[in-house]
Image (tube, helix red, strand yellow):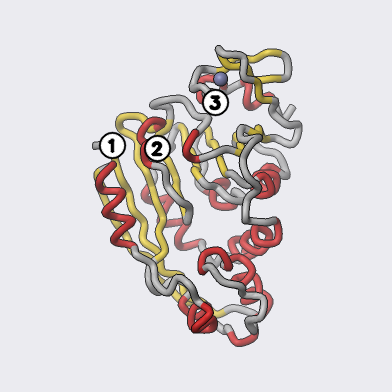
């Protein structure tokens, strides 16, 4: 049963409403205060039933998945893997999206959390051992000091929660876009662009207040792409850039630049 994996790992989870531990009650997870959550047969738990609908939609995640499967982010995934400890015990992907990265960065036990139900349903399709959860990064349904590696890839952070769930010797691995990231799309958008540049130093400075940055690595490369892939890049980025991309001409994009920084941080 695809729901059983959750009952096998109740010690890793905690109630997102009140923070107490879960135990099993029939087909439900139940906390000490009686809050219940039912793992779906589709292989995920919905921990945020009152969440506002996500701005992300299935079209975006499917485009993103095709791009990831075409290998555009393989060098990034390899760099993350190298930054992780060998044989990590518990990995939490906080803001995992459709889970394509998560599946390639698994530990002995892996939890993938995203607020988008569409994304988590896509992630859980096809089964497998990863514990997928629709959940809020500001109220992680994850036990204190239980995680070896928190991954936070192209996603907003909530450091207080990351610090709470990390083991004392655990690590946060955060991926942040740099100024050259998808620069061809930004050039195409011109004046329609609302967020003209990234402020990476603000991200690093905020992170440094909460955790100590142990290492930083920049990964930059440019790859050719087909018109179909260009269209997928446009579909997967509208929110990144805060503007409509529907009117853009995908055939004008012949290459794409990936420019990211990997930040590895430890508990202070
Ligand atoms: Zn509770």
Q: Quadrant of ligand 1?
A: top right
Q: Residues within 10 Å of mark 2 (few under 14, many from 20)?
A: many
Answer with mark 3 or mark 1, whichever residue precedes in sequence: 3
Q: CA distance from mark 3 to mark 1?
A: 25 Å
Q: Quadrant of the C terminus?
A: top left
Is residue 51 shown above or below 4?
Answer: below
Which residue in the protein does label 1 denote?
267
The image quadrant that residue 136 belongs to is: top right
Q: CA distance from mark 2 to mark 3?
A: 17 Å
Q: Quadrant of the N terminus?
A: top right
Residue 115 or residue 256, whichever sits in front: 115
x, y percentage for residue 115? 59, 44
Q: Residues within 10 Å of mark 1 (few under 14, many from 20)?
A: some
For label 3, being within 8 Å of ligand 1 is answered yes
The image quadrant that residue 144 belongs to is: top left
Residue 64 or residue 85, whichever sits in front: 64
x, y percentage for residue 121? 70, 44
Q: CA distance from mark 1 to mark 2?
A: 10 Å
Q: Residues within 10 Å of mark 3 (few under 14, many from 20)?
A: some
Which residue in the protein does label 3 denote?
17
Which residue in the protein does label 2 denote?
162
């Amino acid at each position: 049963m695809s729901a059983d994996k959750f009952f096998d790992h109740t010690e890793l989870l905690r109630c997102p409403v009140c923070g107490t531990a879960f135990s099993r009650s029939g087909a439900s997870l139940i906390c000490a205060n009686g809050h219940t959550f039912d793992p779906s047969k589709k292989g995920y738990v919905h921990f945020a039933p009152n969440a506002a609908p996500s701005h992300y939609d299935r079209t975006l995640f499917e485009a993103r998945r095709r791009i990831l499967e075409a290998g555009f982010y393989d060098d990034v995934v390899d760099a993350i893997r190298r930054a992780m400890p060998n044989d990590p015990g518990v990995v939490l992907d906080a803001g995992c999206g459709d889970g394509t990265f998560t599946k390639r960065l698994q530990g002995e036990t892996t939890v993938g959390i995203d607020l988008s139900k569409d994304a988590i349903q896509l992630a859980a399709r096809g089964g497998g051992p990863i514990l997928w959860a629709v959940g809020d990064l500001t109220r992680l349904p994850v036990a204190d000091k239980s995680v070896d590696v928190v991954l936070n890839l192209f996603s907003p952070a909530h450091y207080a929660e990351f610090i709470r769930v990390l083991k004392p010797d655990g690590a946060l691995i955060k991926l942040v876009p740099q100024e050259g990231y998808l620069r061809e799309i930004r050039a195409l958008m011109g004046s329609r662009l609302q967020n003209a540049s990234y402020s990476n130093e603000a991200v690093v400075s905020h992170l440094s207040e909460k955790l100590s940055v142990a290492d930083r690595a920049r990964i930059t490369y440019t790859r050719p792409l087909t018109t179909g892939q260009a269209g997928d890049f446009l579909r997967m980025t509208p929110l990144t850039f805060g503007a409509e991309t529907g009117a853009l001409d995908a055939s004008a994009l012949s290459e794409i630049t990936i420019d990211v920084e990997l930040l590895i941080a430890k508990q202070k």
